[in-house]
Image (cartoon, coloured by chain):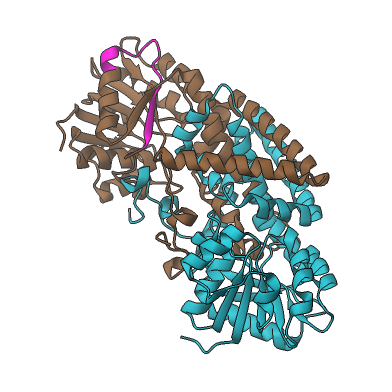
Chain colours: A cyan, B brown
Amino acid sequence: MSRPIFDTVAILGLGLIGSSLAHGLRDKGLASRVVGYDASEDVRGRAKALGFCDEIAATPEAAVATADLVILSMPVGAAGAAAKAIAGALKPGVVVTDVGGVKAAVIAKVEAALPEDIAFVPGHPIAGTEHSGPEAGFGSLFEGRWAILTPSERTTDEALQQVSDLWHGLGSDVEIMTPEHHDLVLATTSHLPHLIAFNIVGTAADMEEVTRSEVIKFSAGGFRDFTRIAASDPVMWRDIFLNNKEAVLEMLGRFSEDLAALQRMIRWEDGDALQDLFTRTRAIRRGIIEAGQETEAPDFGRRGAGDTGGPKSDS
Amino acid sequence: MSRPIFDTVAILGLGLIGSSLAHGLRDKGLASRVVGYDASEDVRGRAKALGFCDEIAATPEAAVATADLVILSMPVGAAGAAAKAIAGALKPGVVVTDVGGVKAAVIAKVEAALPEDIAFVPGHPIAGTEHSGPEAGFGSLFEGRWAILTPSERTTDEALQQVSDLWHGLGSDVEIMTPEHHDLVLATTSHLPHLIAFNIVGTAADMEEVTRSEVIKFSAGGFRDFTRIAASDPVMWRDIFLNNKEAVLEMLGRFSEDLAALQRMIRWEDGDALQDLFTRTRAIRRGIIEAGQETEAPDFGRRGAGDTGGPKSDS
């Protein structure tokens, strides 16, 4: 157990990330008390039953009233309104942070709503699963992952240090960068991959000659890998694309140019160029495995066929 | 142990699939004797040392001379030449089958080379991992997966039944369809996903503002899911795209149309349309899990950070 970094922590938004934070803070002794709130009454009820918070508050104002740290953990499109709702109820000296997948747009909206003397530490853990809701959370989600902090003019050195300590306590490594650079990096490593996955799963679902049941049956040929991230929370992703529009459209433009070149290689049967590209892409995965961000086990180490057979990770 | 279905089986091509077949046939007692051959002397030496065949032959002719079943297990671009090489050395009554990811083009090339009285059963197991070479094989690779057989005019009922029994013995379910339908289905569920994965990994590798080290570091945001299939064997995939060109270009056209529509939704901030699409794609994954072709465990059940932490499959 670590020493608590904050006394009372309020978590607003109790989905996968919010509930995982609550589990992690308590498992690792990083907060003396965790108060939760979610805009959905149904989610509040489920979170209460699951018991991963010390208290589930009935309103955002009540949740933050005694908090030393407030974590905004809702879809990025809702962060501005949440900041507005709690602005008048915050304790002096409180630190506010967030976990949103877009930073520049969120900083603008949150800081417009918060009093000027409140320290805000914009943050984003690069962690998650395709499951959502308060049942999906688990305390080890952030272990061995990166948390990116993107200080703004409202970020004090002291608050930055405390939030950084919190992520270290949850098992993450911390990287500091500008909000704009974050938004470009994540457009590449997260937003574009999700966009493409949503698109290809949509394309396959619409095929009329190939029935949907065939797509499902023969998905082990590669398609099923895309369905994992295309099963991520729809509202969260809608908000990310709307709030990081410029960087996503820029990356999408590059992707489409490259795809046109690849299409041409196939049409003109340029085997050497195809093989060169496919050899180059292989090296990238090796780098991710060496950086400890991916498993080396074949097929992600997953078991096939409803866990009754299929590839074993030790083969 | 099953009763052997074939006495002597020759496997030509000892990569992931060929070596997995050798393991599986011996593990499950489906053949009395397995003879292996690979065009690469280096691979033949490694296969000999690994010992998963009863004998490693020095030439394709020697490998097939006593075989009751010959399995062509090389990249599809090499299948025609292999059939030509063995045509004069085959025993009367032998059955020839293959495991290629493209069927119409392979059938044309193989049947042009084989004597007319030889039974050919075109086949394709929908199984694999991103690893390649004789070290990558394991006998349970085909368990709980589909094997597709696409009979041609040269496929006898008896040979079709025997090859079907062999795949059942390896733990697979068997589906029969035309070569043309196979090539369209696989263009959707396998070839297009691989093409897109190769492309997005290539696009990300070429970014100059976002360094390659950042792409690797923050890949857990979604990008790393694509790198698995983009790490598949370059020669095998070059040959698949060149031999299933028409279906792949057709599917790529549909994908690009859909992507243009999605790009427009982002540019015009049509949040409802985005959310609708993302909700629809979520349902597809559910179907794949219910069909036993995917694990329900979050994050593929993989462990993060070099297996020292990260998401657990039981959370």
* A142 displayed left or right of A88: left
Residue A244 seen in the current view: no
Residue A240 seen in the current view: yes
- Quarter residue B312 falls in: bottom left
- Quarter residue A165 falls in: bottom right
Identify which residue is drawn at 79% across, 69% down. A84
Residue B2 in the image, given as x and y percentages of width and height = 16, 34
Looking at the rendered image, the quarter that the N terminus of chain B falls into is top left
Please tell me whether residue A45 is drawn above or below residue A32 in the rendered image.
above
Q: How many labels does the image show?
A: 0
Residue B279 in the image, given as x and y percentages of width and height = 62, 43
Would you say residue B48 sits in the magenta stretch? no
Residue A164 in the image, given as x and y percentages of width and height = 64, 81
Q: Nearer the viewer, residue B137 or B255?
A: B255
* B243 displayed left or right of B92: right
Q: Nearer the viewer, residue A296 or B120?
A: A296
Looking at the rendered image, the quarter that the C terminus of chain B falls into is bottom left
Identify which residue is drawn at 64% across, 44% down. B278
Q: Nearer the viewer, residue A275 or A69?
A: A69
* A278 displayed left or right of A135: right
Would you say residue B150 sits in the magenta stretch? yes
Please tell me whether residue B53 is drawn above or below residue B50 in the rendered image.
above
Identify which residue is drawn at 22% across, 23% down. B68
Residue A21 in the image, given as x and y percentages of width and height = 56, 71
Which region is colored magenta? B145-159
Identify which residue is drawn at 56% across, 45% down. A226
